Amino acid sequence: MNAPAALSTRVKTQKHWVAALITTVMFLIVCLSWGTTWLSIKIAVETVPPLTASGLRFLIAFPLFVIFARLSKAPIFFPRERRGFFVFVTLAYFSVPYYLLNYGEQHVSSGLTALLFSCMPVFILLFSALLLKERIALSQLFGIGVGFASLFMIIRSQGLHMDHAELFGVLAILAAAVLHAFCYIKTKQKGAAISVITFNTLPIGIAGALLFLAGLGLERPAFSAISARSWGALFYLGLVASVGGFIVYFALLKRLSPIILSFVFIIFPVFAVIIGAWYENVPLSQDLMLYSACLLAGFAITKLPARKVRLSNE
């Protein structure tokens, strides 16, 4: 190999490794930002009621989404024929689920919240089978069974069946995951042509206003009683977790396959559990670590390409 060819190969190799390093860092940023979301919600609702906290988070994020939409020249408004879908997204993807998450975290640890919400891709799989008539492979059914059995053991080992408030918190978080999964399927049916920026920008703004106004009327928050930590958590949720995580995640879509990127939902709960246990000064029991590993492993199986894991005689 002559010198110019060797130099060209070396340059290409260096570019490949630099690109791989950038992609890895971006992937970790998404995992870390989404993994810390749950602790931030926990801190926010320490002194801010859940409706108000949800609304403030979105109102903080909305101006940056508008700027991002303008810079990317993406439309803010949904197509006229999709106005009904716009209302659905605003209510069923942003307003109700995020209130449920904030309510749930008043009674459930941030790490357990992340584990509960990691069920969301599995609900997507189930809704795909029910509404889109997509097949579920035998291995995926096995993964679902392992995941939900592990989830039951986690809830049982944490003693949540003894406290009604914690039980309702768990149900609220699972309901939020179900609503998000249902919205993803409806988006696949009715909103595939809508850009992700359009999908998020105006619904976040309107959901933020609705939640905030509902909070003012129903919760009557005392803004003077909101701690600096809760304000910091709200700004982190609005600026870093919502906007920053969103931008990096969709940038990764151009670098990684959707299947590989979907493993973010398996990895971020690990960050959330570790960070939450450290902040809340709660030791990680062996049972929790074992059942959490089984839960995430089961849900990871559901993400494997079905055509590669179906039995040969199917």
Image (tube, rainbow, N blue to C red):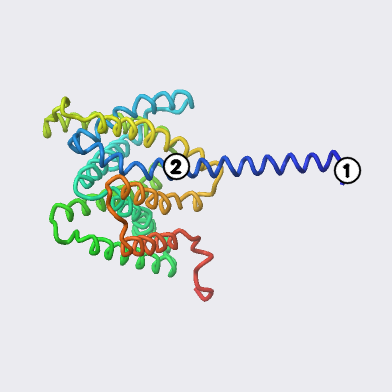
Spatial CA distance of label 1 from label 2 is: 42 Å
Q: Nearer the viewer, residue 291 or 101?
A: 291
Q: Residue at x 23, y 60 (%)?
A: 158
User: In the image, which disc is placed on residue 2?
Assistant: 1
User: In the image, which disc is placed on residue 180?
Assistant: none
Q: Nearer the viewer, residue 67 or 242?
A: 242
User: Does residue 60 sit above or below 103 in this rendering?
Assistant: above
User: For the image shown, how many numbered marks are present on the structure?
Assistant: 2
In the rendered structure, are the residues bearing label 1 and label 2 in contact, judged by CB atoms less than 8 Å apart? Answer: no
Q: Quadrant of residue 143?
A: bottom left
Q: The disc labelled 2 sits on which kind of residue?
A: Val
Q: Farthest residue in the bottom direction?
A: 313
Q: Nearer the viewer, residue 248 or 138?
A: 248
Q: Quadrant of residue 65?
A: top left
Q: Secondary structure at mark 1?
A: loop
List x then y, in percent, for residue 101: 25, 45
List x then y, in percent, for residue 285: 31, 60
Task: Specify few, some or many for label 2: CA neighbours under 10 Å numbering under 14, 14-19, or 20 or more.
Answer: many
Q: Nearer the viewer, residue 35 or 78?
A: 35
List x then y, in percent, for residue 106: 20, 45
Q: The disc labelled 1 sits on which kind of residue?
A: Asn
Q: Residue at x 38, y 45 (%)?
A: 35
Q: Quadrant of residue 154?
A: bottom left
Left or right of residue 18: residue 173: left
Task: Specify few, some or many for label 1: CA neighbours under 10 Å numbering under 14, 14-19, or 20 or more.
Answer: few
Q: Residue at x 61, y 41 (%)?
A: 19
- On the image, numbered disc 2 is attached to which residue? 30
Left or right of residue 313: residue 228: left
Q: Secondary structure at mark 2?
A: helix
Q: Earlier in the sequence, mark 1 or mark 2?
A: 1
